[in-house]
């Protein structure tokens, strides 16, 4: 019987892994080992791994994808070495981005305003001090609107002021 911890050790000790790859793999595998390290790899099925991945709610979808990719690679390694007949997470659908967390998957190119368009924008909003300040903050800092709003809400939480 091979435990998940033993498999992970063999997986991480492969020659030729870059130090940064090894650190990334370790940081991804350690939480999995805390849950299932003593389990035999034969009893870790698709359902167990799906439940584990579904409970990773405090990470971004890109980090979630990394966890899934590393777990898939770990179990593919087990198949390649003959420890398992099939990879329990092969072909598993990736988590979709969460709009509530401000995540998106668009490949659309980011567009910038030309200097002429910026001058028109600043002229139009000049009389609205609050809007002008917000646009200047966004323009000069490169922050996203959602990021500014989070900071704004955090600063005024509990102050009784309208957000």
Image (tube, rainbow, N blue to C red):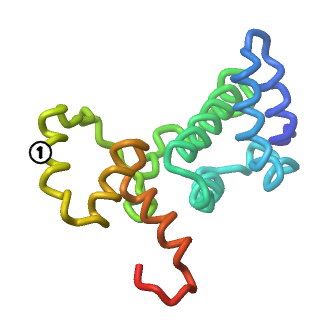
In the image, residue 28 sits, relative to residue 153, either above or below, namely: above
Residue 118 in which image quadrant: top left
Residue drawn where x is 19% and y is 63% of the image: 127
Is residue 128 or residue 145 the one in the foreground?
Answer: 128
Q: How many marks?
A: 1
Where does label 1 land, which residue? 120
Q: Nearer the viewer, residue 81 or 10?
A: 10
Name of the residue lying farthest toward the top: 16
**Horizontally, is 42 left or right of 46 in the view?**
right
Farthest front residue? 127
Q: Is residue 99 left or right of residue 156?
A: left
Looking at the image, residue 39 lies above or below residue 69: below
Q: Position of residue 113 (x, y in %)?
A: 19, 37
Within-10-Å neighbours for mark 1: few <14, some 14–19, many 20+: few
Q: Identify which residue is drawn at 76% across, 43% down.
A: 41
Residue 112 position in % (x across, y down): 23, 35
Look at the image and tell me in which quarter the N terminus lies.
top right
Residue 10: x and y in percent read 83, 25
Does residue 126 appear to the left or right of 68 in the view shown?
Answer: left
Residue 3 found in image quarter = top right
Q: Would you say 63 lies left or right of 152 here?
A: right
92 or 123, nearer to the observer: 123
Position of 69 relative to 12 (above/below)? below
Please tell me whether mark 1 sits on a helix, a strand or a loop: helix
Q: Nearer the viewer, residue 126 or 74?
A: 126
Q: Quadrant of the C terminus?
A: bottom left
- For image coordinates 83% across by 20% down, the residue present is 13
Counting from the top left corner in percent of width and height, residue 33 is at 81, 47
The residue depicted at 75 percent of the width and 48 percent of the height is: 32
């Amino acid at each position: 019987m091979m435990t998940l911890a033993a498999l992970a050790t063999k997986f991480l000790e492969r020659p030729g892994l870059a130090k940064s790859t090894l650190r990334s793999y370790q940081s991804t595998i350690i939480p999995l080992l805390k849950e299932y390290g003593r389990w035999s790899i034969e009893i870790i099925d698709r359902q167990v791994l799906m439940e584990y991945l579904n409970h990773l709610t405090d990470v971004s979808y890109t980090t979630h994808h990394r966890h899934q990719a590393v777990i898939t690679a770990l179990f593919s390694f087990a198949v390649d070495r003959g420890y398992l007949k099939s990879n329990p997470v092969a072909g598993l659908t990736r988590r979709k981005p969460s709009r509530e967390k401000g995540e998106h998957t668009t490949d659309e190119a980011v567009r910038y305003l030309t200097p002429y368009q910026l001058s028109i924008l600043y002229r139009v909003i000049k009389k609205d001090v609050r809007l002008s300040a917000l646009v200047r903050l966004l323009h000069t800092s490169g922050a996203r609107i959602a990021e500014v709003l989070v900071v704004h809400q955090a600063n005024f939480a509990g102050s009784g002021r309208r957000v």
